[in-house]
Structure formats: structure tokens, C-alpha cells
Amino acid sequence: MSKFDYDIGVLGGGAGGLTVTAGSAQLGAKTILIEKSERLGGDCLHFGCVPSKTLIKSAHVYHMMRNAARYGLPTVELKPVDFSDIAKRIQTVINTIQEHDSKERFCSLGAQVEFGDAEFTDEHTVKIGGKEFTAKSWVISTGSAPSIPPIEGLDKTPFLTNKNIFSLDKLPKSMIVLGAGPIATEMSQAFARLGTKVMVVQRSGQILSKEDRDMADMVMEVLKGEGVEFYLNSATKMVRDLGSEREVIIEQGGKEKSLRAEAILVALGRQGNHGSLGLDAIGVENDRKGIKVDARLRSLKHKHIYAAGDATGEHLFTHAAGYEGGIVVSNAIFHLPRKANYTLLPWCTYTDPELASIGMNEKRAKEAGIEYKVYTEDFRGNDRSLAEEEHVGRIKLLLDAHEKPIGVQILGPQAGELLSEWVAALSGKVKPLTLVGAIHPYPTLGEINKKVLSNMISEKVYSDKIKKGLKFFFHLKGRASCQ
Ligand SMILES: Cc1cc2nc3c(=O)[nH]c(=O)nc-3n(C[C@H](O)[C@H](O)[C@H](O)COP(=O)(O)OP(=O)(O)OC[C@H]3O[C@@H](n4cnc5c(N)ncnc54)[C@H](O)[C@@H]3O)c2cc1C
């Protein structure tokens, strides 16, 4: 019999923590979940995926209404956006999903839920307020927060982050976005579509820097076409509050430039929320980004303390947090030595068009020294895409030296949905010939998945060698003359 109060204790009620809690409790482990805020659901539900995708949809509809003529429809006289209505809609969606992430639901699954700011007092004990809880295993799933760099003047200037941008009562007339990662890029397009003049400042020469340059540049061109201004290779030197406006001084090519806007959005990466957990005192290795873990997600010194989700500082996605939660349950409850494997971790940036990715892209393959071949197909060759007035986009398929698919990137309408076929195919090691031989419904965007494979296969099937063989065996007559 264990001397601890609980079999497992979970810190943080977001995607990672809730997965561990639900899994452990349903398996009969005595489980306690401790959440700092008043509600479960974490960043994804309250300040991340859910509000951002809800906002993106509102911006998309407004954009479609403004561009009605493109679809052969009468143009409409549009009223300006009242952001408080969008913020209300965002809250309604959050409230609906919140029911699924309620304390009552987790209690009904068999877990105890406590609210408070958790801190370790020793490697098996956590306190909140005056109460102490001991558990055989602990899981740190306390997520991440926006990283605020020490830019001169930023501490004296009001700015937006993902924590407050979804509850604005009014649409900013103009906004300077610091950073050009997925959050910055999604928000830039959404706000530009709603009517904000958006300026993006990016230190490097490319937006979405994890992605291949050609794909990221296509996204940037679409955003430029919608009025977003980009300042690449630009360092932010200083920020000033001018009262009704804010000023950002940037340095680009050795020259200083002043940008002014009503609002500033800081989207310059993330840092872990683990600072107040007392980890240093109990010897759990960590840095600003997150907690150091081994492949089984165990902290380096204490193998009974795990970390999952953004708390590790590595794969900052809800589905990664959920996957890692499952790995923790396997290790801590089933005692199976299961390791996390991110080779086929997919993700998607929800710009319009979306940019979705799984496995290797060219950048990652080069870094890993992997020999690869690329096949592409553009969306302008897809009938459904044209019917939907979607002209921008490309699928890129990477094959290794043995012609095995090792990665797919899709920039296009509903790319995140289209990627699912590749998630199944790559995870299930489906052969290209099987996938290309499968009948896809017409006309669908998904046909592009089959088309990129047939580009690769037709290179072989329609080769001179095959033609010669067929001519020899079956006496084919060769090309007809076209009159
Ligand atoms: C604007 C934005 C858009 C995003 N969009 C997407 C998307 O489209 N798709 C996607 O996959 N990911 C997206 N993400 C990322 C996603 O939100 C995170 O990867 C995900 O929330 C991580 O889950 P988590 O459980 O690790 O952390 P969280 O969901 O942040 O949960 C951590 C929980 O721990 C609690 N906590 C913190 N400190 C303590 C403490 N001391 N004691 C107790 N509890 C504590 C917090 O209150 C929180 O509830 C987005 C993020 C942002 C910011």
C-alpha cells in the first residue's frame, strides 16, 4: 500500500493535464488535479486555439462578404465591425466547450479537483494555500505564457497578448504585431480582414520560420494582398506610449524607422508557467522555456515527476499536449516504458489559405542531412479549388532515397483537414501505390493528395522504358498524329 494520499497528482487543467486526469481516474488511479485559475480548460480553450479560430471564422465571413462580387454576387454595403460582438461570440463558444471541461465532469470520472496556486514542498508533496497533498507521481502540465522580451519602453506601454486580445471592446484602427510566428500571422490576417491596418515586425527574413521559405512566402504574399505590411529583417529597438497611439522604433538595414499604431500585439514566443512551482528547491531541472524531460517525459532527477504539454517548452500544440498526456498515463499508471515520438507530429497555421505540415519539410530534411526528392502540385490545378475561387496553394511531398514518403506540407484551402489523410497514411505506412489507387470523390480538394502521388508515379509509369516494353510485348502503335 502506497504511503501517499494519491496515486497521481496533476498540476494544470489544460489539454495535457486533463488528458492525464481523465485517463488516470478512469483507470482506477486515485487522482488529484490542481488548477490555478477558476476554470479548467487552459490556454487552448480560454486564450488560444478556441478564441483564435472563432475570431478567424468571423474575419473570414466578413472578408467573404466584402468580396461577394468575386463569386458573382451583388456587392454589399458593409458596416464597420463592432469587436464587442465578436468578443461575445468568442465567449459563447468558450462557454459551450467549457461544459465538457467542467469540474463536475472530471469529478464524475473519479478525480478530485482543487483550485489554487500549486507549489512543491518536497518531491512528493504539493501545497495550495494551507493544504498539502502527497502523490506517488506528479505531472507538471502548467502550460506557457507569452514571452515578453526586455524591449526598451515596453514595460511602460500598454500592449496586447493572447491573454487580452480576444476580449477587446473595440477593434483597433491600427496594430503593430511584434513577431511573425503562427499566432502573429493568424492574428495579423484576422484583424486586417476585420478592418485594422496591420504592420508586422519580424527579426528574420521570413515569416513562419519553421516552415519552408517558398510556402511561408506564399502566405506572406496573400497577407500583403489583403493590406498587411511586413517589416522583415527588422529589430525592435524601442517602444513608446504616445497617449492615443503607440510608437515602435525598428532598425532595418542599419536605418531606424518609426511605426505608429493604436495597439501593439506582442507575439514573440512563449515561456513556461513553472516559475512559482518551487522546482529548483526540489531539483527538477528547468529553464525559462520549460522543464527538462527524458523521452518518457520524466524529469531528469526525479523519475516520478513528469511534464507534459507546453510545460516542456518543446511542442506547443494542444494535440501534442494530449499525446504527451497519454504517454504519461502509460508510464505512470500502466508502468509501460513508452517513449514520446514526434516524427509524425502534424500542425497547422490557420491563415487563409492554411499551412499544414507533417514530418519532414525541406528545411528539416536538410538540417538532418537526409537525402530527399520533392513532388508538388498546385491548387490551381484542382477543379474544386477553382470552383471555390481558391487560386493560391501547393502541396509538397518529400520522399527519401528509397522513395518512402517522409513529409507533406499543404498550403491551401482547408489544409489542416486535408492533412488528415497523410496523418493516417504516414502513421499506417500506407504505400504510395495504395493511396494513389484509392478512389477519391470528385470534385474534392482532397484529390490533390492523390494527384501529387500520381505526379511521382506517372514519372515512372509513362517512362520511355515502360513504353518500349509495352510496344515490344503488345505491339502498340505509338503516338497518333493530331490534325
Ligand atoms: C493564440 C493561440 C492560438 C493557439 N492555437 C492553437 C491551435 O490552433 N492548435 C493547437 O494545437 N495549439 C494552439 N495553441 C497552443 C495551445 O493553446 C497550447 O499548446 C495548449 O494549450 C497547451 O496545453 P497545456 O495543457 O500544456 O497548457 P495549458 O492549456 O495552458 O494549461 C495549463 C494550465 O495550468 C494552469 N497553471 C499554471 N500555473 C499553475 C500552477 N502554479 N498551479 C496550478 N495550475 C497552474 C493554467 O492556469 C492552465 O489552466 C495556441 C496558443 C495560442 C496562445
Image: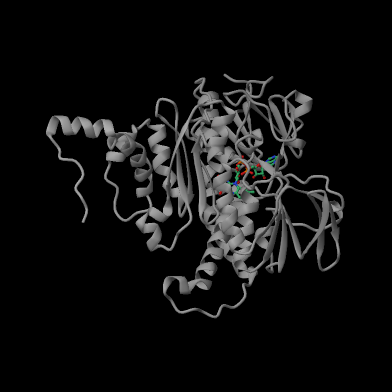
Q: Quadrant of ligand 1?
A: top right
| Residue 159 makes an appearance in the image | yes
Image-based side of 244 in relation to 16, left or right: right
The residue shown at (42%, 43%) is: 420
Quadrant assignment, res 87: bottom right
| Front-most of residues 331 and 373 | 373
82 relative to 53, above or below: below
Q: Residue at x 56, y 58 (%)?
A: 222
45 sits left or right of 393 in the view: right
The quarter in which the C terminus is drawn is: bottom left
x%, y% of residue 53? 55, 56
**Quadrant assignment, res 402:** top left
Q: Nearer the viewer, residue 413 or 326?
A: 413
Is residue 151 shown left or right of residue 196? right
Q: Left or right of 60: which side holds 417?
A: left
Does 428 appear above or below 170? above
The residue closer to the viewer here, 6 or 202, is: 202
Percent x, y of residue 263? 75, 62
Residue drawn at (45%, 60%), measured in percent from left and top? 390
Give coordinates of residue 289: x percent, y percent: 71, 35
When asked about the image quadrant of residue 468, the answer is: top left
